[in-house]
Image: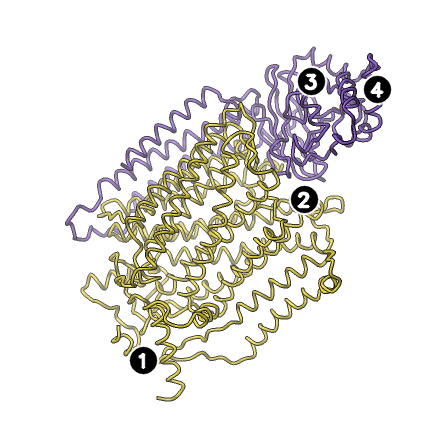
Amino acid sequence: MTSEEKGVTSVAHAYSATVAAGTRRGFWAVLKDWLTTVDHKKIAILYLLGGTFFFAIGGIEALLIRYQLMFPEFDAIPAQLFNELITMHGTTMIFFVAMPLVFAFMNAVVPLQIGARDVAFPFVNALGFWLFFLGGLMLNLGWFFQTVPDAGWTAYVPLSGADYGSFGVNFYVMGLQISGLGTLIGAINFIVTIVNMRAPGMTFMRMPLFTWTSFITSVLILFAFPPLTVGLVLLMFDRLFGANFFDVTQGGNVVLWQHFFWIFGHPEVYILILPAFGIISEVVSTFSGKRLFGYSSMVFATVLIGFLGFMVWAHHMFTTGMGAVANALFSVATMLIAIPTGIKVFNWIFTLWGGKIRFTAANLFAVSFIPTFVMGGVTGVMLASAPANFQFHDTYFVVAHFHYVIVGGIVMALLAGCFYWWPKMFGRMLDERLGKWTFWTFYPGFHLTFFVQHFLGLMGMPRRVYTYLDGQGWNTMNLISSIGAFLMAIGVIIFLVNVFKTAAKPADAPSDPWDGRTLEWSLPTPVPEYNFRQLPLVRGLDAWWLEKREGRTHMTPAEPPGPIHMPSPSILPLWMSVGLFIAAIGFMYAKEPFSIGFIRFLFEHYVIAAGGLALFFVCMIIRSLKDDHGYHIHPEEAEGEAAHQ
Amino acid sequence: MKRWYKAGRTALILAAAAVLLAGCGGALDPRGDRAQDQYFLIMLSFGIMILVMLVVFTLFFTAIIRFRRRRGDTGDPKQVAGNHRLEIIWTVIPFTLILILASFTVVYAFKHDEVIAAEDAVNVQVVGHQFWWEFNYADYGIRTAQDLVLPANTWVNVELTSADVIHSFWIPQLTGKTDTNPGLTKTVAFKTGDPDVYLGKCAELCGEGHALMDFKVVVKNREEFEAWVAGMKEPAPAPATPAAAAGQEVFGNYCISCHAVESDKMSLGPNLKGFADRLTVGGFRENNDMWLREWIIDPQEVKPGATMPAFGDLLSEEELDNLIEYIRTLK
C-alpha cells in the first residue's frame, strides 16, 4: 500500500468512525471537519442546523407578535419594534428557515435517490451553505446594532428606501443579496446533478417525486432569484450610493420594486411548496404501501405549476391600480394553477385509497398536510379574484391564507420529512410517541391560530397592525389566535426534546425502517461517505421496492467495483462567504461618522469593503489555480468497510 | 378522534359563517354598490370552495378511515398506477368551476375599473400622508382632512396619490382598497350608501403609525352635504370669548405654519377648517377636549410615529386651555 493510499484509508475510517460512533476525535478536528466538509450528507445536516437556528429566532418573533395582539390596545410591544418583528419574522421564515430546510432535504436525499455519489459540484454546494448562513447572520445583525429592518418582508419602497427607511433595511438588502447568491448556485448544482448524475436506468420518468420536485424547484430558483437580485441591487444603489431608481422626485417609480419583488416572490412560493409536495408524495406512498397514484400526471402537474408560477406575480399587486386588463388576466392565470394542484391532491388521496395505511408520526404529518393544504389552496383561489381581492388584500385573510400554505403545507411536510428521513440522515429513529405528541399539539395549535384569522380579515382587520381598537368584534378571535400560537410553540419544544433525546441514543437504526420504495433505503445506515460502492442499476419506478419484492437484498450493481473518486474538503467556501460579509459591512457603514478617526477612515475610503471583496476574490483565484484532484477510495478499502459493518 | 376534531371544525366553519352573514361589519356588511359586488364575489367563491372542500374532505376521510392497516395484516396492497377516467374527471370538474368564477371575475374587474361620469358624481382627490388622510374637493375649492364627507347614494370618483410612502385607501363597507402611490395617480369610483358614518383605513404598511391611520367617511343626505360645502367655504367666525382670542394667538404662534384654518389653503399638516365638527382626533380617537389635549401635549403618545412635534413643554396649562377653546370655534 502506498502512503497515499494509507492516507485515504485513514480518512475513510475517520469518517465512518465519526458517523457511526459519534465524536471520538478532538473538538477542533470535528469542528474543522464540519467547516470544511463538501459531503452533501453533512451539508444537509448543516442546512438543517442552520434552518433550525433561524427557526428558533423567527418563532420567538412570531410569539411576540401574537403576544402583543392578544388584547386590543395592548401595549406590551411598541409600534416600531412590532414593525421590526413582523419584518424579521417574515424574512427569516421564508429565506432562512423554509429555504434552508428544503435545501437540507434536497442535499440529504436527492443524490441518494438518483443513485449518485455526491452532487455535481461539492465545493459549490458548501459555498451555497455558507453564503446562506452568513446572509442569515447579516440579516439578524441589526438586532445588535439596534437598527432592524422594519419595512415588511416585502420591503416596499419608498418605505424601505433611502428617504423613509431606517438604516436597518441595509441588513435586509445585504443579507438577502448574500444568501440569494448561495441559493442560486445551490439550485444550479442540483439541476446539473439531476440531469447528469442519475444512475444507469434512472430515466427521468423513473425519478422519485421528491427528486422531480427538487429539480423543478431548482429550475424555478434559477429563473426567480435573478429578478430579486436585480431589485436588491437597485435598492442597494438607492440606499448606499444615492441612485434614484425608486425616488419619484427624480423620475423613479415605486411600483417597479413590487414587480421585481413579486416576479421573484411568487415563484418563491412554489420553490418552497414543490419540494413539500415531493416529501408528501414519498411519505404517503411509502406508508400506504402503494406506488404513487398517477405518477406521470404528478410529474406533469409539477412542471405545469412551475411554469404557471411565473405567470401570476401581479396577483400580489391587484390593488396597485394596474387596471382592468392586467387584473383580469392575472386573476384567470392564477385560478388556473388550482387545476394542476387539484390533480396532485386527488392523486394523494387515491394513493391512500386502497392502501394499508400506517400512521407513523411521519405519516400523521403527511396525511394531515392534505386537508390543510386544500384549505390554503381554496383561499388562494378566492384571493385570485381581483375585485374580491380589493377586500381581502392586506388583511388577516391573506395572513391566514399564506400561513395555511406555509405552515399547514411546507412546515407539515418538513416535519414529515424529518421523521421519515431522520434514520437515514443520523442513523437514529426519532421517538414515535413524542412525535405524535408534537403532532397533537402543533396541528390543533396551528388551526387555532390561523383558522380564525380568515374571519378577522373578512371583518376588516388589516395585517401588519401593531394594535387594534376595542369594540370591532375582533377581541375573542385574536385571543384564540394567540393561544393557538403558544400551543404550536409547545409542539415545537416537544420536537426539540425529541431531537435531543434521539441524539443521546446509540445510532442503531435499521437501514430500511419503513419498508421504503426508493434508492436511499437500499443503502446501509449510516450511509458511507461515497454513498454507493457500485452504482445501482435501476429497473423501474420505486427501484428499491421492486428489487425487494423480487427477493433481492441489494440493488443489482451497474458497474464493477473500482476506485471511487472523492472531492477534498475545503475551507475556502467559508472564507469566501466571510469575505462578502465583511464587504457588505464595509459598504453599509461607509457614511457612518465613527468617533475613532482610524476606523472612520477605513470605512470612508472603502478599505473594509475592498478588503472583504479582495478576500472573496483571492479565495476564488486559489480555488481556480490550485490543482486539487481530490482523492480515491479503492474497492478493497470499500469492501473491507462493508465487511466491517 | 381525528374525525371528531374535523367534524368539530366543520361545525365551527358553519357557525362562524352564520354569525358573519348576520353582519359583523367589514366587507361582509356591504353598503355601497362596489362593496356589494365584491361581497357577491366573495360569497360565490366561498360557496364554490366549500363545495370543493366537502368533496375532497369526504374522499380524504373515507380513505384514511377505511384503508388503515389492520393489526397483523402484512401483505402488500394492490399496486395501482393510475386511472385515466378519474384523472380526467378531476381535471374537468375543477376547470368548470374555475371557469364560472373566472367569468364573474373578469366582468367585475372591468366594471370596477370604470370612472363614473354621472352628473351628480363627486370628485375628490385623496392624498395619503404619514399618518393621515387629505381630501381635496377641487370642484368646490375645499381642502380638508380625516373626515371624508360625501352625499348619500352618490357615485364618488377618488383620485388617489401619496405625499410620502405608499398607503392604501380602504372603506370596507363601501369599496375595496386601492393603493395611493407617490408620484402616480389612480382614479377609482365607488357609490356611497345611506347616510351613516363608515370606517376608513390605511391597508398598506406605511410606517410606525400605520395601525392607527384610520379615517371616517361621513355620508350625509344631499341637502346636509350642500350645507356642509357652504359652511366650509365661509370664513371662520372671529373668536367670541377672550380665551378663544388668546387661543387664536397661540395658534398663530405655534400651529399656523402647518395647519391652515381656511378650506381653500394648502397646508403641510391636516387643514383644520371645520375641526370642531370632526368625529375624531388623529383619525381614530373621539373628538373631545381630553384627547385633543393629549394630542397637543404629545402626539406620538396617542399615535406612534405622528410627525407633529410635541407641544407639552412649550405651552402653559392656560395656553393649552385657550388653544383648545379656539380650536373648538373652528366650525
Is residue A73 visible to the viewer in this orientation of the structure?
A: yes
Q: Position of residue A218 (x, y in %)?
A: 47, 58
Q: CA distance from mark 2 to mark 3?
A: 36 Å
Q: Position of residue B150 (x, y in %)?
A: 67, 19
Question: Marks 2 and 3: same chain?
Answer: no
Quarter where residue A13 is shown = bottom left
Residue A487 bears which disc, if any? none
Quarter where residue B313 is shown = top right
Earlier in the chain: of badge 1 and badge 2, it is 2
Residue kind at label 2, given as amino acid type: Pro
Q: Residue at x 59, y 44 (%)?
A: A84
Q: Chain of mark 3?
A: B
Q: Residue at x 42, y 48 (%)?
A: A410
Q: Which is closer to the viewer, label 4 or label 3?
A: 4
Question: Marks 3 and 1: same chain?
Answer: no
Question: Marks 1 and 4: same chain?
Answer: no
* Chain seen in purple: B
Q: Chain of mark 2?
A: A
Question: Marks 1 and 2: same chain?
Answer: yes
Earlier in the chain: of badge 4 and badge 3, it is 3
Q: Which is closer to the viewer, label 3 or label 1?
A: 1
Residue B120 bears which disc, if any? 3
Residue B246 bears which disc, if any? 4
Residue A637 bears which disc, if any? 1
Residue kind at label 3, given as amino acid type: Asp
Callout 1 environment at 10 Å: few (<14), some (14 to 19), or many (20+)?
A: some
Of the pair B129 and B67, the residue shown nearer to us: B129
Q: CA distance from mark 3 to mark 1?
A: 91 Å
Q: Colour of chain A?
A: yellow
Q: Chain of mark 4?
A: B
Of the pair A175 and A324, the residue shown nearer to us: A175
| Numbered disc 4: secondary structure | helix
